[in-house]
Image: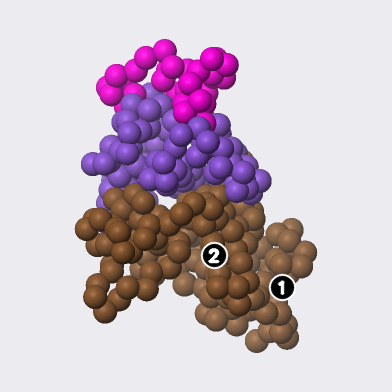
Amino acid sequence: MSASRFKVKALAWAPYIEPVDVATATEEQLAAMQVTPSNTKVSPYVRTLAHDPESYVARTKLFNAIMYAKGGLDRAERELGALVASAVNRCVYCASVHARRYVELSGRSNVVEEIYVRGLDGPFEPKIQAIVDFCRTLSQTPSHVGRDQVQALRDHGLSKAEIVDLIHSAAIFGWANRLMHTLGHSTPVDDR
Amino acid sequence: MDQIDILSGIKPDSELYRIRRERPDYVEGTELCRQTVLEPGHGFGIGHAMRAALAARMARLIGRNDLARAYDLMLEEAGSNETLAAIGSAAELPADEDIFTQALVRHADLVTRTPRDNTSADIERLAVAGLSNPQIIALSELIAFVNFEARVIVGLEALELVA
């Protein structure tokens, strides 16, 4: 489908604060991290957020609903919403994860190449342009989102229910990026 | 009708109201998250009133005065004072304000406005001001939630205007 062979590298993530130690974690933290005798490997990201287990559990459930709920907006397009938000917020780690998921689901490495090499200005093909423009404005300057940008999504065939999914997938990365990018940084995978 | 319906201008019998209810995990999940960041069971010493004041402030920075007023009300109910009112109204804090409060406010402003520019030094400043690791995470989740909520409202409001 796409002539591009552009590849985004997988990255790891390292926190700026000391994450929760599984060996000394509270019952509530262990439950939040889903640690069991057969599963004691927990990512640094989860262990960092497990300092506040209550918010971690609630947000993870909401995140999974938004990114993986059945029906509605195509999963690839939710990943594109996530990628655009992550590009705006310069969350290198989130961008790499969701750029790769978008390519896996859509085969459109040319879109990812455009975003990585030239940024969010485009030009992209019309439907992708409408999605990028809307998610970019929502992420960067929410006060500038207007009905024209939503009308463009409708004109390119998105239903209102699909647009509700897109709003949530871009918005939840306004959340995720504000954790991942401020609480730690990406590292090469080999570094671990 | 929940806060997001009301602030997005969604009518109770509208198409968009119905569409939202087809995604109960979004609707209920958002309200559950609101509780965990604004009225958590364990607040790690950052109280409900301070959280409401910071939420009102961030909503104002994002340009949603209606959302800010909802948090002003929450702050009133939680019990406001001069410092909290200043925080909520997005005013500058007096220079002699305690460093812990200054640090909370500075971080909320920064991560709301320009998260891309945050570095490890910003987290170190929180630690130096006396925030524990759980407080750093609780603050980060609160900031991120309000930014999420405001964007959902903005998006739904624009969608409600479109045929």
Q: Which chain carries label 2?
A: A
Q: What residue type is labelled 1?
A: Glu
Is residue B90 within the magenta segment? yes
Q: Residue at x 76, y 67 (%)?
A: A117
Task: Inspect this view and state whether residue A79 appears.
Answer: yes
User: What is chain B's hue in the picture?
Assistant: purple
Going by the numbered disc 2, the residue's amino acid type is Trp
**Residue B64 image offset from top left, x and y in percent:** 49, 32
Q: Residues within 10 Å of mark 2 (few under 14, many from 20)?
A: many
Task: Name the residue furthest right.
Answer: A118
Question: Residue A145, can we see it?
Answer: no
The residue drawn where x is 36% and y is 60% is A21
A98 versus A130 height, above or below: below
Left or right: A4 with respect to A25? Answer: right
The residue beneath circle 2 is A13
Mark 1 crowd level (few <14, some 14–19, many ≥20, 10 Å Cα): some
Q: Is mark 1 on a helix, strand or loop?
A: helix
User: Mark 1 = which residue?
Assistant: A113
Q: Does the magenta stretch include residue B112?
A: no
Q: The brown chain is which one?
A: A
Q: What stretch is highlighted in magenta?
A: B74-103
| Label total for image | 2
Q: Which residue lies furthest to the top in this view?
A: B82
